[in-house]
Amino acid sequence: MTLSEEDYIKTIYHLSDFNSKSVATNAIAEQMKTKPSSVTDMVKKLSEKSLVNYKKYQGVSLSEKGRLVALSIIRKHRLWEVFLVDKLNFSWDEVHVVAEQLEHIKSDTLIDKLDAHLGYPKVDPHGDPIPNKDGVFTKSVKKLISELPVGSQGVCVGVNDSSAAFLKFLDKNKIALGDTFKILEIEEFDGSVTISTRSGSISISKQIATNLFLEIVDEE
Amino acid sequence: MTLSEEDYIKTIYHLSDFNSKSVATNAIAEQMKTKPSSVTDMVKKLSEKSLVNYKKYQGVSLSEKGRLVALSIIRKHRLWEVFLVDKLNFSWDEVHVVAEQLEHIKSDTLIDKLDAHLGYPKVDPHGDPIPNKDGVFTKSVKKLISELPVGSQGVCVGVNDSSAAFLKFLDKNKIALGDTFKILEIEEFDGSVTISTRSGSISISKQIATNLFLEIVDEE
DNA sequence: ACAATTTTTTAGTTTTGTCTAAAATTTATT
DNA sequence: AATAAATTTTAGACAAAACTAAAAAATTGT
């Protein structure tokens, strides 16, 4: 597989909503910052290799073979992201560009050993699940803390309110994107939530809880 | 710089004996398993970018700019080799192919952080020196243990005698390629040498000492 | 239903890096 | 020094992956 082919497969996978839904030529072109005609050419090539199902004017979908290729690239991407953050102290938001290059390195042994070195992580620094060698992975959902039951655990991936005041509050309480939180207790009386962080547990008001998104990985 | 350009620069550097000596078109073609005509084409391109000095029929040499590019690729290659051996438990002889891919990843930050993570190593697992960010590096020489004075230190990189009996002896004494040894004492009487290894110090006969090569890095 | 618009494909080029075959230059031999 | 041999370059072509412009098919609006 060439680098370019891998990028197409990955894009088709993402646009098809992690599914085998049919994707439009134009959508691929826009996503990859290329022209629709280039997409048609490549899609024909991928179809020859039976990585995608393609009928003229009807869009493309990944074949099972293509889906497995996509998952193997995503596995590599996410493992490298964990490496960059956990081992090299990259910050949460710097890793994507570098991982986009590293994901194309071809060596099964390398990925196996990297996985072991990282302690077989289940999710990447953004909270997204890491597929295993066979392409099996747990789906994840993005939910507000206020929508979650006691015991849930996830990675903080976003805010609803991005006012300076709110961000200041997060900073003061050592809450940062990429941190993992667990919901310990929900107070019936005022809806405040106690969550555990790396630096101990804190209580946040209902208002805060309705402004913080966690990425939750379903249990297997 | 494209992947292919980087490979040419690296090959020219190696063929010019880590120097700026002029290299023949045919030699490059043979090394890169390509045709002389392809080499001529690429060399013209590198000359346009003033990475090499080139005059028709007179061979190529790296310019100062080209030499720095070569050293930066070698730096990356060797740092990744250290990573693969020290952190991922690759064996000494498996790392080259993977490092050939990793050396092309483009990110200065990545290499800085990798260097720090590895503890700023001076040599790779083969005993070859790692250039610093500015392309400065210590030259290394390959010598028999019997040729070295007390106090020398180096990485075991080869054997003279590859008989089964000799290899068995090495195995029994836990001497492996890639290990670092220091010469502690040389016995005047019989020329036997005491060396320190990871698992303690051992004494080896003169005969053994004339069959083991160490890669020695000059002191700065 | 049919014209207008949008989407997708085709046809013909371009660029990068390679190749083959032939020409030019250098090196070696006698 | 002249010719043979080896090396290197040129010229022309090709495959991959992109592009532009134009044609074809599908979708939308009335």
Image (spheres, coloured by chain):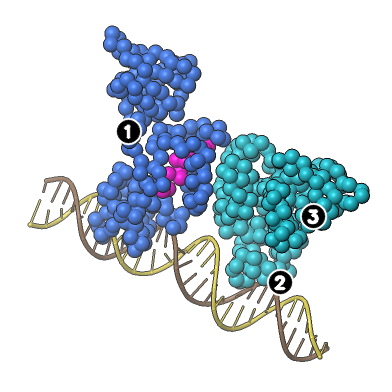
Chain colours: A blue, B cyan, C yellow, D brown
N-terminal label among 3 and 2: 2
- Tell me, for residue B57, which label it has, or none: 2
* Residue annotated with mark 3: B208
Residue nearer the viewer, A83 or B157: B157
Residue B100 visible? The answer is no
Magenta-drawn stretch contains A46: no
Residue nearer the viewer, D9 or B28: B28
Q: Residues within 10 Å of mark 2 (few under 14, many from 20)?
A: few
The percent position of residue D20, horizontal first and vertical second, equals 39, 58
Q: Residue at x 65, y 57 (%)?
A: B9
Q: Is residue A39 left or right of residue A1?
A: left
* Residue annotated with mark 1: A218
Q: Amino acid at mark 3?
A: Ile
Question: Tag 2, which chain?
Answer: B
Magenta-drawn stretch contains A78: yes
Q: Amino acid at mark 1?
A: Asp
Question: Helix, strand or loop at disc 1?
Answer: loop
The percent position of residue B154, horizontal first and vertical second, equals 76, 47
